[in-house]
Image: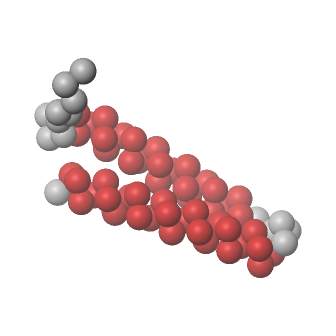
Amino acid sequence: MLKAAIILLLLATLVSLFSGLFFLVKDEGHGSRVVNSLSVRVILTALTVALIAWGFYSGQLVSHVTW
């Protein structure tokens, strides 16, 4: 369940990234839709990092790195 939430947040971040690119090209840098897209992307990324940290803290995510 946690991994699915992380994947969904990453996909939503990608959608926000490409929507920001679309707004940048369409609005030619004028308007606030690019800024809104950036703020949504920052919030989604912060949520993703928080979920990953919580997953490691709770033991639901483990690292199998040998180093």
Which quadrant of the figure contains the N terminus? bottom left
Q: Residue furthest left?
A: 59
Marks counted in the figure total 0
- Residue closest to the far front: 66
Left or right relative to 8: residue 31: right
Q: Is residue 11 above or below residue 67?
A: below
Residue 18 at x, y percent in the picture: 59, 69
Indicate the colouring scheme. secondary structure
* Residue, far top: 67
Residue at (58, 63) in percent of width and height: 17
Furthest residue in direction bottom, as rendered: 26
Looking at the image, is 19 positioned above or below residue 40? below
Is residue 29 at least partly visible in the picture?
A: yes
Quadrant of image for the C terminus: top left
Coordinates of residue 47 in the picture (x, y in percent): 41, 47
* 19 relative position to 51: left or right: right
Horizontal relation, residue 58 to residue 45: left or right: left
Residue 53 higher or lower than 18, as above or below: above
Residue at 71%, 73% (x, y): give it: 23
Q: Which residue is found at the position 84% from the left and 72% from the top?
A: 28
Q: Residue at x 67, y 68 (%)?
A: 21
In the rendered structure, the answer to whether residue 29 lies left or right of residue 41 reads right
Residue 56 falls in which quadrant of the image? Answer: top left
Q: Can you give x and y, in whole percent of width and height, for residue 14 in the image?
A: 49, 63
Can residue 33 be spotted in the picture?
A: no
Q: Nearer the viewer, residue 63 or 32?
A: 63
